[in-house]
């Protein structure tokens, strides 16, 4: 259990995750101020799609490799 927690924390601290979390925080602040521009929204959507797409791909490869 402890090893799983350490592994997840290590993955969370990778650059890709830090960028995604920081960008999400900026998006939340801009949304609360009602200042989200179209350019920011486009960049944010691409980055979030990339992040979750790579997570899904990694999960699919792990599932496929073990079957």
Image (tube, rainbow, N blue to C red):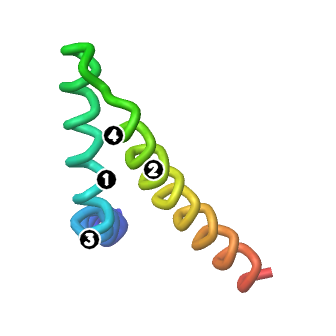
Q: Which mark is residue 40?
A: 4
Q: Is residue 28 above or below residue 26?
A: above
Q: Quadrant of residue 35?
A: top left
The x and y percentages for residue 44 are 39, 45
Q: Circle 3 — which element?
A: loop
Q: Are marks 1 and 2 in contact (CB under 8 Å)?
A: yes
**Nearest to N terminus: mark 1 or mark 3:** 3
Q: Is residue 63 above or below residue 39?
A: below
- Measured in 3D between alpha carbons, the distance from the residue under mark 1 to the one under mark 4, in whole angstroms, is 13 Å
**Nearest to N terminus: mark 1 or mark 4:** 1
Q: Say few, some or many: other residues with alpha carbon within 10 Å of mark 1 (under 14 / 14 to 19 / 20 or more).
A: some
Q: Circle 2 — which element?
A: helix
- Tell which of 16 and 62 is nearer to you: 16
Q: Which residue is mark 2?
A: 48
Please report the residue visible at 31 percent of the width from the left and 53 percent of the height from the top. Answer: 20
Q: Nearer the viewer, mark 1 or mark 4?
A: 4
- Measured in 3D between alpha carbons, the distance from the residue under mark 2 to the one under mark 3, in whole angstroms, is 15 Å
**Nearest to N terminus: mark 1 or mark 2:** 1
């Amino acid at each position: 259990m402890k090893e799983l927690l350490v592994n997840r924390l290590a993955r969370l601290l990778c650059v890709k995750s830090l960028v995604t979390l920081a960008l999400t925080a900026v998006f939340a602040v801009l949304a609360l101020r009602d200042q989200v521009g179209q350019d920011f929204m486009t960049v944010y959507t691409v980055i979030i799609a990339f992040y979750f797409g790579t997570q899904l791909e990694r999960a699919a490869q792990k599932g496929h490799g073990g079957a």
